[in-house]
Image (cartoon, rainbow, N blue to C red):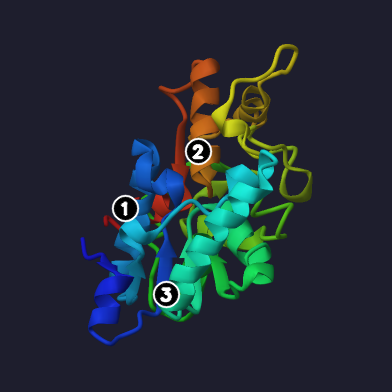
Amino acid sequence: MIVKTMAEYFAEGKQPEILFWVGSAGSYDDRAKKITKAFVKILNKANVQFAVLGTEESSTGDAAKRAGNEFLFQMQAMMNIEVLNGYEVKKIVTCDPHSYNTIQNEYPSLGGKYEVYHHTQFIQQLVKDGRLEIDNETLQSKRVTFHDPCYLGRANKVYESPRDLIRRLGVNLTEMKRNKSTALCCGAGGAQMFKEPEKGDMDINILRTKDALETKPNIIATGCPYCNTMMTDGIKFHEKEDQVLVKDIAELIAEANNL
């Protein structure tokens, strides 16, 4: 698996096509690392020249900002922007909608202006440009439902790229009763991922997973590592882990293409 850092490209006097922003979950969470690896396999398959920051990548500051610590957010953001601008980064792709939202919408006012894409948007473009083909037979018999990540869907109105890719897999895509602009949060947004529900609160992920299970899916497709964790915990609560899989769209494409 070929992964070069921006520092390595810089030393060679070259600039990659994109910077892959891995994000905190994709870097440290064992489950999310599988999503990272699947996306890297897709990039290599499509012969995309890409780089990561490696140890120079820090948290975008999303969790700090949502938790109300603006000072910490700005400190983390300015540090990242200094590194990104130092490498003259122009285009960023990430599997994490939280990073996508923060870098696209909140970094510009601090001096960080980049083209930012969610990985489903970038993969969709690779397909349209003829750089990547998606096998539509491997998963053909599967029934799939898609959970819209809040920071991809409602916050940034990105609804079609994930669905387009799922349809290209040849599966039976079945929508939940609450989808797109009316989709229910998985329960991890706003820094809630890192705390237990407060007394009297209901577990949102349990309710959202119930929405998904009502479609009788074989697979719940996600486009966010945090959503993946919350939906996985949800199917365990409903005791459906032996019947329903939770997978990121990048993982489904990699699996379909035997990557």
- Closer to the camera in the image, 128 or 67: 67
- Say which residue label 3 marks: 18
116 lies above or below 235? below
Disc 2 on helix, strand or loop? helix
| Amino acid type, callout 2 | Asn
Image position, residue 157 (x, y; %): 72, 60
Q: Which residue is mark 1?
A: 37
Disc 1 crowd, CA 10 A, few/some/many (<14, 14-19, 20+): some
Q: Are circles 2 and 3 on residues that touch, CB within 8 Å? A: no
Vertical arrangement, residue 87 with respect to residue 237, above or below: below
On residue 228, the disc is: 2
Of labels 1 and 3, earlier in sequence is: 3
Farthest residue toward the right? Answer: 182
Image location (x, y in percent) of residue 24: 44, 47
CA distance separating discs 1 and 3: 16 Å
Three-letter amino acid code at disc 1? Answer: Lys
